[in-house]
Image (cartoon, rainbow, N blue to C red):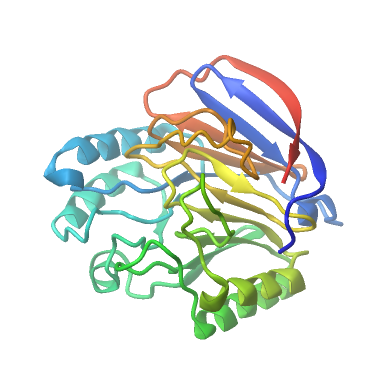
Amino acid sequence: MKTPTSTRREALSIIAGGATLAFSPACLANSKRPLSKLRFLVASDTHLGYKNSTSAEKRWIQAAAELKLATGDLVLHLGDIVDGGREEQYEVYLREREKIGKPVYEIPGNHDPLDLFRKHIRKQVDVAVDHEWLKFVLVSNAHTDSHDGFITDAQLQWIESQCVAAKKQQQYVMLCLHVPVHSNRHPDRGWHVKPEHGQTKLYDIIERHKQQIVAMFHGHFHNGIRGWKDDDGIHEICLPAVLYNLDRGLEKQKAAGYNPLEFRPGYTKVTIDKGLMTLDYKPLGADVSINKKCEFDRDG
């Protein structure tokens, strides 16, 4: 994709207990038919068993309790369910997931060995989930021996087939992969899908179907909300981790894209309504009753 050069007016809210970003995905702005309001929830990077302590379990217990009460029809988990492939921790994860009382759809992260994911979570790893007019395309793009992402030719063909199917069904697509596709260098982590591992081919697919694709969601970065939007592209967004998030000083260093200054452990409430996609970053245990909105011009 091209490097960021254009400026688009987006809405940013700094909240007493989090941050809210509102975007206007081009495909929804151009929709010729009314779309029902959608609300769903996103968690990521629970890393159960982290450092062989109970800290991650306590965070997941709290997150699951809040997800149960939060408004949303379903929950996405964007990977790294357990830490370092600790198999016994999947039981902990599933115990609390059951209490959420909503459908939960996961993708594996680089800490989730595929054999264990198939055993404990879902036999078919790459799946498409239809929810009203939106199709969630969940893709496993992480390896346990690397922080980079990998998309096979077979997966690329499947992704394109889902975009084609969505168009026929008059749906839009949300792509969900653990590792971000967008190129990033220092001061970012530098972890992404490299051109030779599927990045270029995926962007070609997105270009062919950009009128159907709302955004790409990722986990992996532990940087709160970290996102990019290149010229004529779609928003590619890493969402907050439940276990921990770090401030890498990206805003101060004027790194391309956006990284609102909120880094507490948390999850995301997503609302899509009237052509606007709103991300509400909800830190665990925080009061988000005070909402002070402003607007800003953001490159990328």
Q: What residue lies at 49% left-to-right and 28% top-to-bottom?
A: 262
Q: Is residue 279 above or below residue 6?
A: above
Q: Quadrant of residue 172?
A: bottom right
Q: In screen coordinates, is 202 left or right of 77?
A: right
Q: Quadrant of the N terminus?
A: bottom right
Task: Give 195 or 114, whichever is nearer the viewer.
Answer: 195
How many numbered marks appear? 0
Q: What residue lies at 75% left-to-right and 74% top-to-bottom?
A: 208
Q: Is residue 253 above or below residue 143?
A: above
Q: Position of residue 284 (x, y in %)?
A: 38, 28
Q: In screen coordinates, is 21 left or right of 63?
A: right
Q: What residue lies at 32% left-to-right and 39% top-to-bottom?
A: 243
Task: Give 31 or 192, whichever is nearer the viewer.
Answer: 192
Q: Quadrant of residue 87?
A: bottom left
Q: Quadrant of residue 291?
A: top right
Q: Position of residue 77 (x, y in %)?
A: 41, 52
Q: What residue lies at 70% left-to-right and 75% top-to-bottom?
A: 204
Task: Give 252 or 76, whichever is nearer the viewer.
Answer: 252
Q: Position of residue 112 (x, y in %)?
A: 29, 63
